Image (cartoon, helix red, strand yellow):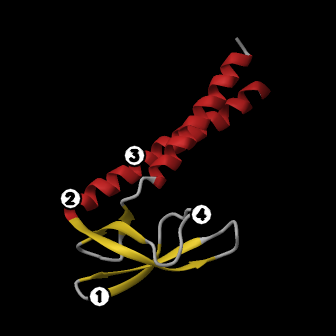
Amino acid sequence: MGKYIVLLPGIILTGLGIYTILLYTKKVRHLQEEGYEVTATIIKITGSQKQRKAIISYTVNGEIIEKELDYYSNHMKVGDKVKLYVSKENPRIFVSAETVPVLTGILTAFVGVLVTFIWFSSFS
């Protein structure tokens, strides 16, 4: 039973990575087809060194919206531009056109597959 405990994180990480990829790409595809493409500007970087968040500002139909970006990268700085896909029904709903969240999902799935592969290799 104990040897199967190690397999569980591999399966969970793989599933979580695949779920992240599918969910994010579905949302991006929907907003690409049904929403607006806008360019946002990073107006503020908040948080501690490990918990940084980028606050963006963008305009839709004359309304200025400020929200937290759905990801953060260390190379970001105030004044940088970010491409977004924004919902027509609710312009506060958006996804970044960047691939960072998808890459995170791919990395998570890869680690999960790697852990699972190592588990199978150690017991064969």
Between the C-alphas of marks 1 and 4, the distance is: 29 Å
Element at label 1: strand
Q: Which mark is residue 74?
A: 4
Residue drawn at point x = 29 percent, y = 88 percent: 63
Question: Is the residue marked by circle 3 packed among few (<14), some (14-19), or many (20+) residues within 10 Å?
Answer: some
- Tag nearer the camera, 2 or 4: 4
62 lies left or right of 26: left
- Are discs 4 and 3 less than 8 Å apart at CB? no
Residue drawn at point x = 63 percent, y = 27 percent: 116
Mark before the other along the chain sequence, 4 or 3 = 3
Q: Amino acid at mark 1?
A: Glu
**Residue 12, placed above or below residue 115:** below
- Are discs 2 and 4 less than 8 Å apart at CB? no
Total labels drawn: 4
Residue named by callout 1? 63
- Tag nearer the camera, 1 or 3: 1
Question: Is the residue marked by circle 2 packed among few (<14), some (14-19), or many (20+) residues within 10 Å?
Answer: few
Residue drawn at point x = 73 percent, y = 15 percent: 123
Element at label 4: loop
Q: Which mark is residue 33?
A: 2
Mark before the other along the chain sequence, 2 or 4 = 2
Q: Residue furthest right?
A: 2
Residue named by callout 3? 22
Residue 96, by quadrant, is bottom left
Residue 74 at x, y = what percent? 59, 63
**Residue 7, placed above or below residue 70:** above
- Are discs 1 and 3 less than 8 Å apart at CB? no
Element at label 3: helix
